[in-house]
Image: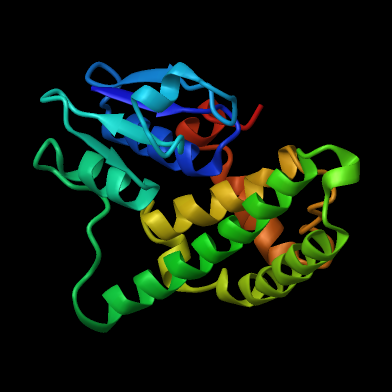
Amino acid sequence: MKLYITPGSPYARMARIVVLEKGLGDRVEIVAARTRAVDSPYYAIAPSGRVPYLVRDDGSALEDSAVICAWLDQVDGRPLFDLPPGEAGWEARRLEAMARSLMDGVAVWLRELSRPVHERSPGLIAHEAARAGRICDVWEREIAHPWMHAPLNMAQIALACALGIEARNPDFRWRAGRQALTEWFTQIMTRRSFAATAPV
């Protein structure tokens, strides 16, 4: 299998973490994709140009980090990241959705900063910065939720990858006044799969 990624993508990082946690390194080749470039050869592989993008052994492909992570978790018949049943499962989904919401907004913010200065939208940047601040305030309370301290799960992976965007966006200053969230992030970053996939 081939997993197409860009080193700085938090979405691709999620898939890379699942590959490492599942011990699939000998089955999944990580391939750096060239995105956001006119006529990139990557577009012949992934027409959307998005990452991650997984081409399976039979030639069929999957895109979207949630779909790819779920498939990689199930491929060996020994899933690590299945959701618990009942209300606990809905709580897990709620937390993952909130983590992905943070990631989506901060990713939009980061993409805007990658544009030439004269093409950036100050209004969009201010909107996403404010939204990120609000969500991080909620996470300062929610980080005490038992699911965020359970064995590694997709809500934890999504939140850590979202917060990790700080490495590429120095204006994303989420730590100040959020001690519980900072301590949680510092601890999870010691995990080998997170350290190995740190943004560049």
43 relative position to 76: left or right: right
Q: How many labels does the image show?
A: 0
Residue at the image position 25 percent from the left and 49 percent from the top: 70
Residue 113 sits in quarter: top right
Residue 48 percent location from the top left of the image: 42, 39
Residue at the image position 43 percent from the left and 22 percent from the top: 42
Could you say which is closer to the camera, residue 18 or residue 178? Answer: 18
Residue 21, relative to residue 164: is it above or below? Answer: above
187 relative position to 124: left or right: left
Residue 89 sits in quarter: bottom left
Could you say which is closer to the camera, residue 150 or residue 114? Answer: 114
Residue 150, relative to residue 36: is it above or below? Answer: below
Could you say which is closer to the camera, residue 18 or residue 9? Answer: 9
Residue 49, relative to residue 42: is it above or below? Answer: below
Residue 92 percent location from the top left of the image: 36, 70
Residue 97, relative to residue 26: is it above or below? Answer: below
4 relative position to 184: left or right: left
**Which image quarter holds the C terminus?**
top right
